[in-house]
Amino acid sequence: MMEELLLSIPYVDLLPEWLVLTMANVILIVLIVLPVILHVAYLTFAERKIIGFMQIRVGPNRVGPRGWLQPIADVIKLLLKEIVIPSNANKFLFLIAPMLALIPALVAWAVIPFTDTWQLTNIDASLLFVLALTSIGVYGIIIAGWASNSKYALLGAMRSAAQMVAYEIAMGFALVGVLMAANSLNLNEIVTRQSGGVLDWYIWPLLPLFFVYFISGVAETNRAPFDIAEGESEIVAGFHVEYSGITFGLFFLAEYANMILISTLTALMFLGGWLPPFDIPLLNMVPGFAWLWLKVALFLFFYLWLRATFPRYRYDQIMRLGWKVLIPVTLVWIGIVGVAQQTQWGYLFH
Amino acid sequence: MTFTHALFYLFGGILLFAAAMVVTIRHPVKSALFLVLAFFSAACLWVMMEAEFLGIALVLVYVGAVMVLFLFVVMMLDVDLAKMREGFGEYLPMGGIVAVLLVLEMVIVLSSDMFSPQNMPVPLEHAADYSNTHALGMLIYTAYVYPFEIAAVILLVAIVAAITLTLRARRKHIKYQNPSEQIKVRREDRVRLVQMKSEKRS
């Protein structure tokens, strides 16, 4: 689509084909990544405002009208600050770690369908692709913790690694349920299968898997109440204790981009993505992207709500929840879905 | 040379470099990180061979889970590099013989007619709608269903064996928490309000 648009500009059709193709893709990538980064900026603002509201205080209100320019000020502050590299740290790994955290969080958007036609690439195993990419995001944290040459950072990295391995399994099993129901690994097709109305969304037949997926998603993004990798009260700031300026900013960006990614995936797999809640003409007129945006915003609100409500889990409690509660729940529900699909109750898990 | 050729040599070059670094670099953590890079380049090569399911699964399983555990253990090790270098001369003759033998065997096997380019079939290029995931699923659950299931059972046995080997009997002096008991606690179990007369001023 973008390629034809480019070719309609005069003189562009004189360029070699591969150049036009690359240009078209780069424009599309910018069109996806820039809004994601803008959403990250205003998600931090929304977080401070919403948590402020929940704790009966005002939140940031100094920069710009009602504080709306606060995220811009934060970015400028982070860009201008000095980057301090600790002595005896491994400089190369220390500087590459924030990038390793951010890149998977952004690459995963390549396969996310925003509506049935707005998608950068529609690959067949997109669900697996996203799962693989979210799982390599942990390297940024582990390498940061090790390369910082600091006890607190190393402790944070160790905690993060153990947590990631535990919750990855629960997350993968929850996705197995989704792919059994949808009969496909393609995100676009998973959403299309849920068309019909609110009762056709996978949240109802796969309710336990939905809870497991979202809880593991919160754990994978290291957000409260699973933020032991940071744990301000016991290990200062965990893996990013030695990071300053924009290197810290990149970790921050990666964390929030991952939050938006997990919320989008939950909306796509369990809440019918861009589909309206009722299949009536009035709601069908609303562009599909608006529905997806609303559903993602709902899950992002849950993230903030959780942070304002729950105290941090202890390490052993996290391990118990992951291994002894979430994984058995998913295993049982996968068995139920499998048995139902082979018998007359298969229509429940279509 | 097309673009795919260039990509193949790029990924292949990175893979060879990373694999060589895994065995030559001194520091175990860096060695493990190079292994991650090697796995990742191998996955890229597999994706280029239209085996995208296997490529992504390699990243998911080995890079995303196995190597994280590896790094977890390796980072905890306190490695004394000087001590590791001590026995180098002692092991050199034995290791050298093994290495030379390995190289010789590889040369004999790979230079035979079996692996000559003429005898290799040119891989088919599939259309864009070909789904490697579907093809693999069909094969695993029809033609190879028994080997697949047996491999799964063997892995399960290995898991059970590993757990039994590391499981220690509960020692008496360690206190375990029982979360359901903790949740059941009500205020009356922990706090007792006592009525008492106020003390006289002395």
Image (spheres, coloured by chain):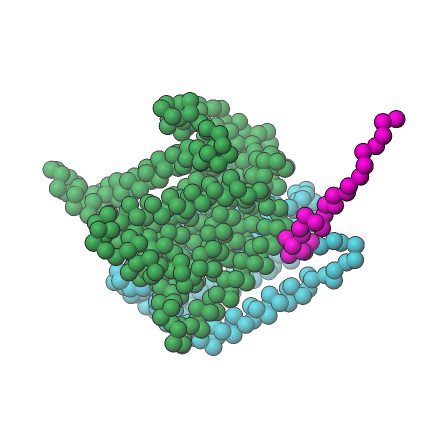
Chain colours: A green, B cyan
Q: Nearer the viewer, residue A281 or A1?
A: A281
What residue lies at 62% left-to-right and 67% top-to-bottom?
Answer: B160
Residue A31: image location, x then y, percent = 28, 40
Total tally of numbered discs in the picture: 0
Instruction: Name the spot of residue A225 as percent of width and height, x first.
Output: 54, 44
Q: At 33% across and 45% down in the image, what residue appears?
A: A293
Magenta stretch secondary structure, dominant: loop
| Front residue of this view, candidates B194 and B97 | B194
Q: Which residues are magenta?
A: B177-202
Pick the quarter of the image with the C terminus of chain A: bottom left
Give left or right: position of A126 versus B156. left
Q: Is residue A289 magenta?
A: no
Q: Is residue A194 left or right of residue B90?
A: left
Specify whether residue B193 is painted magenta.
Answer: yes
| Relative side of A346 to A286, left or right | right
The residue sitting at the left extreme is A10
Q: Who's the residue at 36% across and 24% down the image?
A: A65
